[in-house]
Amino acid sequence: MEVRDLLEDRVLHTIRTDTVQIKKIAYTPTGKGLISLDERGNLATWNLADRSVQLRDQVDILPSPLIAYTPETSFLLGFGMSFVFHAQDHSAAASPRYSRPSIITPAVAYGFSGQIQASVTADHFSKGGWHFANQIRYVNNNRSYFFGLGHHAQRSNRTIYHNNVFSLAGSVTKGIGDRFFAGVGYQIRYDSSLDFDASAPLPIPDNNGGLLAGIGPVLQFDTRNDLLFPTKGYYVDLSFTRFGSWLKSDYGFSDVRIDYRGFHALPILTTGTTLAVQALYHGTMDGEAPFYQLPYLSADRILRGVWRNLYIDRQAVALQAELRSNFSNIDPRYGYVLFAGAGDVAPNFFKGYTPDIVGVFGMGYRQQVIPKRKLQSRIDVSYTTKGDFGIFGGLGLSF
């Protein structure tokens, strides 16, 4: 049983009674303790100054329904199970610098156009400062559109293709000091041959599929005050990945990513209102990447509501902002977001660039599934300045 401060959304005290259910509870006249009555009629007093009874649960298990709509998949319905492992604050062996929850999420989903997706995502922080982030994913009958490349792409010229995709991506980093993580990132992906629509209205790219394998350094800077729901601080992720035949890859090229995120508490609306900002650069160079591995703008990247392959090229940049708040201070478990963003793609932003920026805006509903951790479920509705529409749901923040 938890005694909570609803205004500040925090747990004041936790009481454990094994298998006996508490029927009634009240403060003592002095306010320094609690009196409880269990189902067996036994009275008990609890000294609130004794912090030894306030141990957290080791693991939270969260069922998470998956709901999404994209033009490629139509409606996508699925189910996941998130296992959230909490650092034990009372353990002397745990460094407070790395006291962060670890999450493992297996999930499976079905798209109404015939896709089956299965994945396992793991994000683990060790006591010694090691961070292991990995995702393994398989998509059967992956259904996507090809629109062409760069600013020449048009929705009216799209063609459908199908294939199966297996991917394994992640990183292993080690904390250096209080804020820096450095390590190695990797990506392995195998695509079966791409089956394009025979009546394609535009030239078809290489449809052989094949193996992608790459590895390279990762550098992260993290000052966020909370991993699941940051209200202040910054996060920067820099990565360089080289794909090549020396790793048995069928393609050779370099991949560079810069991901910046900032979080700012605002003294408006309700307690905990936050402005979150993200800026992303993604570029490929020194070789030829298959079109499905080129930088892109899309819902799973940064711009909700954009078709997956509509904006792809050798380089992509995007910026988005999200206002996060609650409906009231009385019950902060329920909230909303307002968001907007913009992005563009080009062969080279530093040479002969002609802007053709796409914007996105929308709103979303949030509900805390673990109030004491502020872990949220979400569903968003978005529109773009070029007429695209999307509905997306999931567990955790969008960024």
Image (cartoon, rainbow, N blue to C red):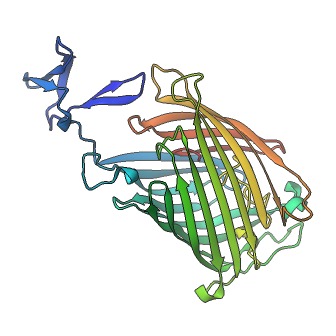
Q: In the picture shown, does residue 197 fall above or below 373?
A: below
Specify the quadrant that holds the N terminus. Answer: top left
The location of residue 18, given as percent across then percent down, is 15, 38
Q: Is residue 291 left or right of 127 when viewed as pictured?
A: right
The answer to which of 86 and 262 lies nearer the viewer is 262
Left or right of 58 on screen, residue 69: right
Q: Position of residue 210 (x, y in %)?
A: 66, 81
Q: Residue 249: x and y, percent?
A: 63, 83
Snapshot quadrant of residue 349: bottom right
Q: Which residue is rendered at x = 39% and y = 52% of the image?
A: 97
Residue 310 appearing in the image: yes
Q: Residue at x 61, y 66 (%)?
A: 239
Q: Is residue 102 left or right of residue 218?
A: left
Q: Residue 161: image x %, image y %?
A: 74, 68
Give 394 or 25, whichever is nearer the viewer: 25
Q: Is residue 354 above or below residue 35?
A: below
- The residue lying at 84 percent from left, 73 percent from top is 204
Q: Is residue 113 visible?
A: no
